[in-house]
Image (tube, helix red, strand yellow):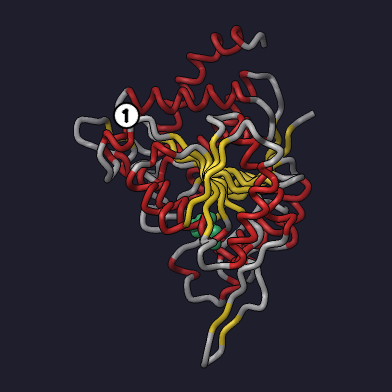
Amino acid sequence: MAHTIALLPGDGIGKEVTVSAVEIMKVIAEIFSFELSFTEYLIGGCSYDEFGTPLTEETLNGCKKADVVFLGAVGGYKWEKLPHHLKPEAALLRLRKELGLFANLRPAKIYEPLIDSSTLKRETLTGVDFMVLRELTGGIYFGSPRGYNEKSGWNTMVYSYEEVERIAHKAFQIARTRSSRVTSVDKANVLEVSQFWRNVVHKVHEQYDDVELTDMYVDNAAMQIVRNPGQFDVIVTSNLFGDILSDIAGMITGSLGMLPSASLGELYGLYEPVHGSAPDIAGQGKANPLAAISSAAMMFKYSFNLPHASELIETAVTEVLEAGYRTPDIYSTGCTGIGTEKMCELIKEHIYQKAAYARESYHL
Ligand code: IPM
Ligand code: MG
């Protein structure tokens, strides 16, 4: 039976990078002999333009019917002045909530060939490979009461036991597949909700005595990510802190154009590049498709249980970078500058070259 994928290219470069990711998914399906079926829906600004809402029931139901959702990016200058609930970003928040995507995985990995495009020194970055696990459907993003009037504005940061418990389990489970170290980030010296978070994480940790747990305040964590990112394996944190820390973590790797993400719940998985819709370069064929392509790699690993397909894609990405090919966002002197389509072509070629070997070593 075919794996069904709801495709939400969205706005700006979201459309272009999704085309590349789909090409790669098709190549993988061909190599590993399974079927993928795609249905495309509007989301974000383009949906607002067409239907007056950034997320229609049709799109939402389409996502619920599919095995996984693949999203490009949403947003753009054009829709910035809309009221909150009509902004493209509101679609993303509702989608996360409706699909129960409580666990957001944002890997921060240094690709050796790109190490010099980071603002940090090479010696600080060598070997950096950690995962920010962000709670995605609770906390201040969704707490009530919320609002503002002429005199004040307010939001509520709230977590239930179950919400912290399930993300903590996820953190320890992911850590077991990596270096078995979890840093739980909070602000327990000031916020009661954070003290509660810390208590629950420690309670869950009793079931994972093979995993090392450290607590860290969020301000210190922000500093440590820049000072010595190599110390981290899995960072687990709440929605707002994770939003901020994952941008810091992303930036030290040198380019947001390289970073994939997965948002997982009990029933669904949504995969998207971390970067936005980049309206300034949209439609010019310049966008870096590697974050979207790596998001497809995460999809094969986490939703379809095909880690070897995922590795095949990741190896191709590394090799193409090693061969000196770069889209403008990661370009440096002496490299070969290319656009979105060419980058996708090269990844495809590398995957095909390695396919025979991969089939043999995985007995396919
Ligand atoms: C992210 C983004 C979103 C968030 C916005 C677009 C709503 O910054 O995915 O990190 O704040 O979660
Ligand atoms: Mg963000």
Q: Residue 73: image x %, image y %?
A: 52, 53
Q: Is ligand 2 less than 8 Å from the beta carbon at label 1?
A: no
Of 230 and 40, the residue lying toward us: 230
Which residue is located at x 65 percent, y 19 percent? 32
Above/below status of 34 relative to 64: above
Residue at point 73% right, 33% down? 3
Q: Position of residue 190 (x, y in %)?
A: 51, 68
Q: Is residue 176 above or below residue 265?
A: above
Which secondary structure, mark 1?
helix
Residue that mark 1 sits on: 113
Instruction: Determine the residue located farthest toward the bottom in the rendered image.
Output: 150
Residue 119: tell me if it is visible: yes
Q: Quadrant of the C terminus?
A: top right
| Mark 1 closeness class: few <14, some 14–19, many ≥20 residues within 10 Å | some
Which quadrant would residue 29 be assigned to in this image?
top right
Q: Point out residue 68 in the picture as x, y percentages from the top left corner.
A: 69, 42
Q: Quadrant of the N terminus?
A: top right
User: Residue 18 at x, y = what percent?
Assistant: 53, 43
| Rendered residue at 47%/71% (across/down) | 80
Residue 289 visible (yes or no): no
Considering every residue shown, the one lying at the far left of the view is: 333
Q: Residue at left 67%, top 74%?
A: 144
**Towards the viewer: 84 or 55:** 84
> Which amino acid type is marked by label 1?
Pro
Numbered marks: total: 1
Direction from residue 116 to residue 172 in the image, left or right = right
Q: Is residue 316 left or right of residue 118?
A: right
